[in-house]
Amino acid sequence: MTQKIVPPFTEETARAKVQAAEDAWNSRDPERVALAYTADSEWRNRDSFLTGREEIKALLAAKWQKERDYKLQKQLWAFAGNRIAVRFEYEWRDQDDQWWRSYGNENWEFAPDGLMQKRFASINDVPISATERRL
């Protein structure tokens, strides 16, 4: 799908939006990821509350400094109108080489131009061994 994906979403376009987000996040490029959000996008990420691309970029840069070898999978959970819900899991290792699997849910709301204007994420981390990795 090469055209811009805008609401209202169909199952096909919602799945494409989720895949585009997964691809962008797996790039681990804060600049690239931030372009998917409105300039005044509102976020809740764990215990952080952010507004705007600059705060998003700063959070992501710090995240990927800490979360080495990050690999993410997202799955569409539900969609309606200009909203999408996803479940996700990702794996990463910390500076002590401890592997982690992080699970969570995100609720997304999009502006008419297809940029995400709200993202609310709940995330839990579970320590795993290297042999338990799936991603």
Image: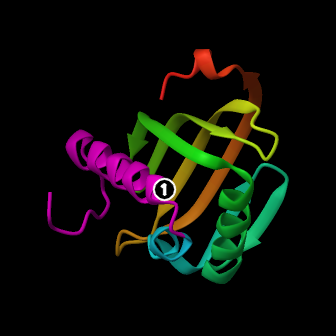
In the image: residue 33, left or right of residue 3? right
Direction front: furthest residue:
96
Residue plotted at (60% across, 57% down): 119
Position of residue 132 measured from the top left corner of the image (x, y, whole percent)? 60, 16
Q: Is residue 16 magenta?
A: yes
Location of the N terminus by quadrant is bottom left
Position of residue 85 measured from the top left corner of the image (x, y, whole percent)? 50, 41
Identify the element where label 1 is drawn: helix
- In front of the other: 83 or 24: 24
Coloration mode: rainbow
In the picture of the structure, the residue carrying the numbered disc 1 is 25
In the image: residue 110, left or right of residue 103? left
In the image: residue 32, left or right of residue 40? left
Residue plotted at (47% across, 29% down): 135
Position of residue 133 measured from the top left corner of the image (x, y, whole percent)? 56, 22
Q: Is residue 38 magenta?
A: no
Vertical relation: 60 (above or below) 129: below
Residue plotted at (51% across, 58% down): 109
- In front of the other: 90 or 98: 98
Dividing the picture into quadrants, the one containing residue 97 is top right
State the extent of the magenta-drawn residues as a range. 1-29
Image label count: 1
Mark yes or no: residue 85 visible: yes
Residue plotted at (42% across, 59% down): 24
Give the amino acid type for the residue marked by disc 1 in the picture.
Answer: Trp
Direction top: furthest residue:
132
- In front of the other: 99 or 25: 99
